[in-house]
Image (cartoon, helix red, strand yellow):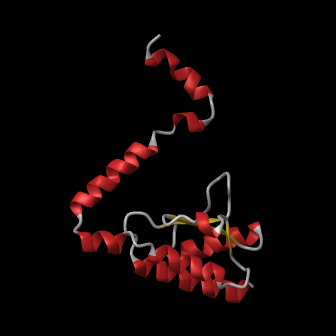
Amino acid sequence: MGARGRFPIAAAREPATQTPAVVPAANGSQVSLRLTFSEDTWVEVYDGTGAAVLYDAIDSSDGFYSGHAAREARSLMNVTYRLPSEELDARFCDEATRHGLDGLKGHRTVGGIRASIYNAFPREGVDVLVDFMKDFASRNG
């Protein structure tokens, strides 16, 4: 039976079975970026300062924001966290969208907030999000 004949089986399974292999794609992406950028730019783009700034805002919020991942397992690309309630999570996302910060709603199976800072997301954008987070916490904490 050809690949076409097996598709209904794959389609009936969980969506994860249809997820493409990400490791080869990520490796290819890294190689392409490495060949494209100079060494100085590579370090600047992937040094994790944006994630560090976001995690510092989470950690210094006196518990208003709480990270999903253990400190030693934190991602430099997807900063995930929760607010004290699902209602506040939803309000945070709504207000953030009105302030031009879109796409912060967490993954459908995990919930909370997810700030994706892939592909050299500008530090200025991280700073805007952190300022919004501080303001939101002061008004809702």
Q: Nearer the viewer, residue 46 or 116?
A: 46
Give the image quarter of residue 46: bottom left
Residue 127, x across and y down, in percent: 48, 83
Residue 134, x across and y down, in percent: 62, 86
Does residue 51 appear in the picture of this structure? Answer: yes
| 129 with respect to 82 (left or right) | left
Does residue 114 appear in the picture of this structure? Answer: no
The residue located at (33%, 55%) in the rendering is 30
Tell me if residue 64 comes above or below residue 36 in the rendering: below
Residue farthest along the top direction in this orientation: 1
Residue 29, x across and y down, in percent: 33, 52
The residue located at (32%, 48%) in the rendering is 28
Give the image quarter of residue 32: bottom left
Q: Nearer the viewer, residue 128 or 62?
A: 62
Q: Nearer the viewer, residue 113 or 55?
A: 55
Tell me if residue 129 comes above or below residue 23 in the rendering: below
The residue located at (66%, 66%) in the rendering is 70
Residue 98, x across and y down, in percent: 55, 75
Residue farthest along the front direction in this orientation: 72
Image label count: 0
Q: Nearer the viewer, residue 62 or 30?
A: 30
| 121 with respect to 71 (left or right) | left
Give the image quarter of residue 106: bottom right
Tell me if residue 141 comes above or below residue 108 in the rendering: below
